[in-house]
Structure formats: structure tokens, C-alpha cells
Image (cartoon, rainbow, N blue to C red):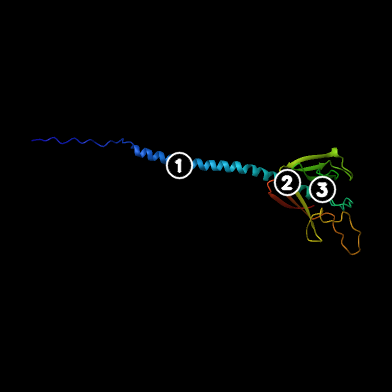
Amino acid sequence: MIRALPHRSKPSLHAGFTLLELLVAITILATVSIIAWRGLDTLVTTRARLEPEGERVRSLLTVFGQLDRDLAQTINPTFFAMTTPPVTILTIGGQPALSITRLAPGEADAPSALQVIGYRLEDGFLVRSASLPMRGRGAVAAEEITNVRLLGGIKSLRVRVWNDQQGTWVDPLVTQTPAAVPPAVPGQLVPSLTPPGVEISVERNDGTLFRKVFLVG
């Protein structure tokens, strides 16, 4: 007697994911997406916050670079028979200002010309003024001066010079220093009219203070 065996279905080779597996995969993908979005959002926010500060720092470095070039070209008062310092600190609008008499830029074979450069604060801006090149010494007319605003948001400016005799930084607006060549004494060195170094301190409106020392000449 022949008995029929029960029919067994073959396992499908194209079985899909179950609903539970799909839910787990979707949950994992959603979690990874949220983490990636939060990281990208933090990166964009940090960049947006630091970009203005980076621009201000670049502007400040540009100003310091221009100051460095101006002070590096300070004239030697002995060569031009000057009896006043080529680097002076004065007061304009209640704030200290820096005046520099430097060699004007020009061709290598052209006669030397002088140029008066000034740095001062005006309405919260650090302003650089420059006169036209002059072949000789004399007064500078107002219409011959070019003013350029270099840096905004500035609260205060401080300028000090290095005093070799005292071996320290001094503020000429507080400490009186001789403005002319003293009488020559036999066997005694005459102090130079030009300070070897200038210290510039710039304070922004947010209280951040930047300080840099420049060599003169």
C-alpha cells in the first residue's frame, strides 16, 4: 500500500524584511541624520560667529603692517638737520595721536622727499592721514592731507616710546621729554631725537586690547 507523503513547500529565495526590521533601520537612520544635522548646524553657527571676529583681526593686522612700514621709513633727523623729533605724540580731541615724518615712497633714482603721516582716533575710527611728498621742510596745508579710516569700533588709543636713559616705556603726554637737541657737552653723548621703539595699544569697544611694539627707522 502506497501512502502519499505530506507536501512541504520550499523556502523562498526572495524573502524580504519584516516590519520590525524596517522600523529598526528607519530609527537608526533617523538617529544618524539628527546627529549629522546637529554637527553641521554647530559648524555653521560657529563659523558665522567667528567670521566677523576673523575679519576684524585681519583688518587690525593690516593696520599694524602699515604702521610698521611707516615707522621703518622714519627719517634720520641728523641727515635733514632737524632739531625736533621725527616721531612725536600729541593730543587731538582728547586722545593721543602719533605723528611720523618719514621718507616718501618714490623711484630709486628720484630725489628724497619727506612725508608726514599721522594716526588718530576720530568718531570711533582709527584714521591715517598722509601729506603729499615734500622736497623740503615746511608747514603742511590741510588740502594736501589725505585721510583714510582704517579700523572701526575703537574706544581708545595709547602710544608710548622707549626711553634708553630710563630703560622703560614712557608716555610723552605724561612724562615731559626734551623736544630739541640739548647743548653739546665735550665728552658726553647727545641723546638721539628718534626713539628706538614705539608701543601702540588699541582698545576696542568690547574691551579687547591689542598691543604691539614697533622698531623705528
Residue type for callout 2: Lys
- Report the mark closest to the observer, 2 or 1: 2
Residue type for callout 1: Val
The residue singled out by tag 2 in the image is 155
Q: Based on the displayed image, in which of its 4 quarters is residue 52 positioned?
A: top right
Task: Classify mark 1: helix, strand or loop.
Answer: helix
Tell me the crowding category of disc 1: few under 14, some 14 to 19, or many 20 or more residues within 10 angstroms, Cα based: few
x and y percentages locating residue 68 in the rendered image:
75, 49
Give how far apart the Cα atoms at labels 2 and 3 are: 15 Å
Q: Based on the displayed image, in which of its 4 quarters is residue 48 positioned?
A: top right
Q: In this view, does 96 lie to the left or right of 54?
A: right
Which is nearer the eye, 154 or 67? 154
Q: Based on the displayed image, in which of its 4 quarters is residue 121 positioned?
A: top right
Task: Classify mark 2: helix, strand or loop.
Answer: strand
Q: Earlier in the sequence, mark 1 or mark 3?
A: 1
Q: Which residue is drawn at 66% across and 42% down?
A: 55
| Callout 1 touching callout 3 (CB < 8 Å) | no
Which mark, residue 32? 1
x and y percentages locating residue 29 in the rendered image:
43, 40
Tell me the crowding category of disc 2: few under 14, some 14 to 19, or many 20 or more residues within 10 angstroms, Cα based: many
